[in-house]
Amino acid sequence: MPVQEPNTRKPAVIVISGGTDGMGRALALARAERGDRVVALGSNPAKGRHLIDEADRIGVADRVRFLQADLSSVAATRQAIRQIGARHEAIDALCLFANRQSPKRATTPEGLERTFALYYLSRYLLSHGLSPQLRRSRAPVIVNVAGVGMTKGAVSWGDLQLERKYSTIGAQLQAGRANDLLGVAYAAQPHNPIRYVLYHPGFTKSGDLSPLPTAARLFIRAAAKVAARPVEQSIAPVHGFIDSPPPVPLVAIDRGTSLPLTLRTLDPADAERLAEATRALLDTIPPAPGAE
């Protein structure tokens, strides 16, 4: 009989925002089953306990850590970054899933429109804030799960906080286009070894629908039975991005199709413009008391 080679793969450290729901939760448990150490970020402690309970049921509770953080808060996201950095010298993958739809315009205690803060700003902060730890990995990668490939919606340059005109879909589309540009600007940094993947999984049976009106929840659930992809199918490519990061600084994948980086939604000038606007916005939010 042939001698089977031992599995010498070193466990990876993976940080997952939105790690207690849908695709993020499924990825957290799947990676722990593969032997990786997972930090799952989420705002709901009950969902965090359920994640740990499920990890315990499948025998991987020692590999999954739940870190409670309201990622719509800049201060809370910065605190989570400090906590992760204090515990992990190196991070191999950062997977960004956190998002929640808001039927009405709502603001965070810091005065930010909530969808923009959660869906885009948290991803900007985590990407840049955990860069030192990612750079210590031999093959670091960031996977930003949003809507790359879609061309609907745009960044409202004169009204990033959508004070003049708000809609649930408009807010989602703006944040999605902002994430496209986040990937472009991040990958363009000089001497940057961290690969950035913009990934659109398509319509998936995933996520928390509780903020939506009853009629909308029923419609989405009915549509999901017909057209949505299973969670396992949607996260399958993410395993590949983690295990074999792309050889180039930036890739954009829409449901298995590699997209040209010349798409108008991936314009480098717009990416730099948004990066400057984001830095200016974040400069207006002071550090929390006691933060470094």
Image (tube, helix red, strand yellow):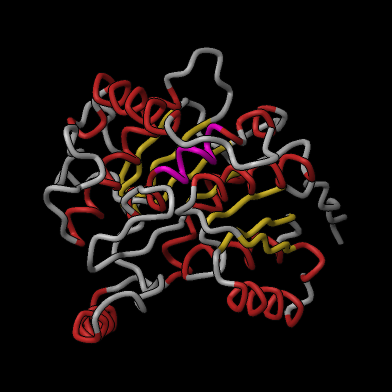
Residue nearest the viewer, comparing 110 with 172: 110
Determine if residue 56 is in view.
Answer: yes
Question: On screen, 185 above or below 98?
Answer: above
> Quadrant of the image for the N terminus?
bottom right
Residue placed farthest to the top in the image? 190
Question: Which residues are drawn in magenta?
Answer: 121-128
> Would residue 143 be found to the left or right of residue 87 on screen?
left
Question: On screen, 200 above or below 205?
Answer: above
> Quadrant of the image for the C terminus?
top right
Determine if residue 26 is in view.
Answer: no
Which quadrant holds residue 191? top right
Find residue 192 and report its horizontal and vertical position in percent: 55, 20
Residue at x-position 35% and y-position 22%: 276
> Would residue 213 be found to the left or right of residue 127 on screen?
left
Numbered marks: total: 0
> Would residue 135 be found to the left or right of residue 179 on screen?
right
Secondary structure mostly seen in the magenta stretch: helix
Find residue 57 and report its horizontal and vertical position in percent: 74, 82
Residue at x-position 42% and y-position 48%: 110
Residue at x-position 52% and y-position 62%: 24
Instruction: Check residue 173 for magenta coloring.
Output: no
Residue nearest the viewer, comparing 210 with 184: 210
Residue at x-position 40% and y-position 55%: 108
Find residue 87 and report its horizontal and vertical position in percent: 79, 45
Residue nearest the viewer, comparing 111 with 121: 111
Residue nearest the viewer, comparing 136 with 111: 111
Find residue 194 and report its horizontal and vertical position in percent: 56, 29
